[in-house]
Image (spheres, rainbow, N blue to C red):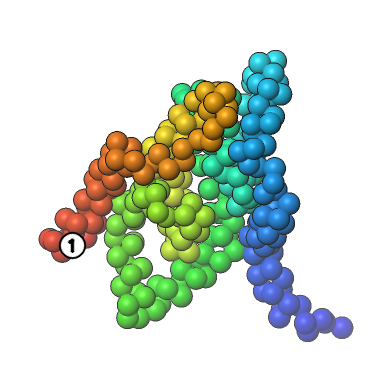
Amino acid sequence: MTDMTRPDSQPEKTGIMRRLPLIIIILVAIVGAFTLRDYLTFDALRDNRESLIAFRDSNYALTAMIFVFAYVAIVGFSLPGATIATLTGGFLFGTAFGTVFNVLGAGTGAVLIFLAARYGFGEKLGAKLEAAEGPIKKIKDGIDENQWSMLFLLRLVPAVPFFIANLLPAFLEVPVHRFAISTFLGIIPGALVFTSVGAGLGEVFAAGETPNLGIIFEPHILLPILGISALAALPIIIKALTGKKDI
């Protein structure tokens, strides 16, 4: 006797499996928000700095590997402590190598959550937006025509939350390679600033102070970043003035 329920249940099971990675990320993010917020803090870094340095000195390659994987997990599961992780990268590895490890960890984690969101909801939502009419369709078309510029702006403008910058492109059917390239390159300026702050934490700890995380908004830091953002936005402005589209 033929099971008449299988054709109807198969799409439902497939839909659940497609959404499973993003569901797991959301659940882990919720649990992590309550369980890790007291561990991934500046105080925890200050209290454990000697142990971290000792372990790094004895196992540099292993420390770097663990750090990158930990950063991937923090970003990939949207856990609290990304800023502290960036400071830790600078504190343990210095500005140059710390920036490399921070960008590698944050960029990889961002790509993972992008893929989870796109695999679970992005394609279906993108198709609905494409079939939509009126203002919604115009917004999507505007983003499609200026994807590179918009992607870089999402990364360069400090006001855009990192989590939003990871999810929004997934829902707008941005190609994976464009997202990855714009992410790894776009987060370099901010990562360089906070990593350099982390590299100077030894003096901060010695003085019993806390780092100035608002440094990115100081004119000598913010103005160059805004300048880069203006360059990223230039193609959008030119197209708006000339009415031309990408070929």
Q: Residue at x 47, y 40 (%)?
A: 213
Q: Is residue 186 above or below residue 163?
A: above
Residue 186 in the image: state x and y as whole percent. 39, 43
Q: Residue at x 53, y 36 (%)?
A: 210
Question: Which one is nearer the viewer's eye here, 165 or 9?
Answer: 165
Work out which residue is located at the far top of the displayed protein and give it.
Answer: 58
Q: Is residue 229 left or right of residue 118?
A: left
Residue 244 in the image: state x and y as whole percent. 17, 60
- Give the structural element (helix, strand or loop) at label 1: helix
Residue 97 visible? The answer is no
Estimate how packed mark 1 is, as few (under 14), some (14 to 19) or many (20 or more) residues with alpha carbons within 10 Å.
Answer: few
Q: Is residue 123 left or right of residue 62?
A: left
Tag 1 residue: 240
Q: Is residue 247 above or below residue 199?
A: below
Q: In which quadrant of the rendered image does the N terminus lie? A: bottom right
Residue 92 in the image: state x and y as whole percent. 58, 25
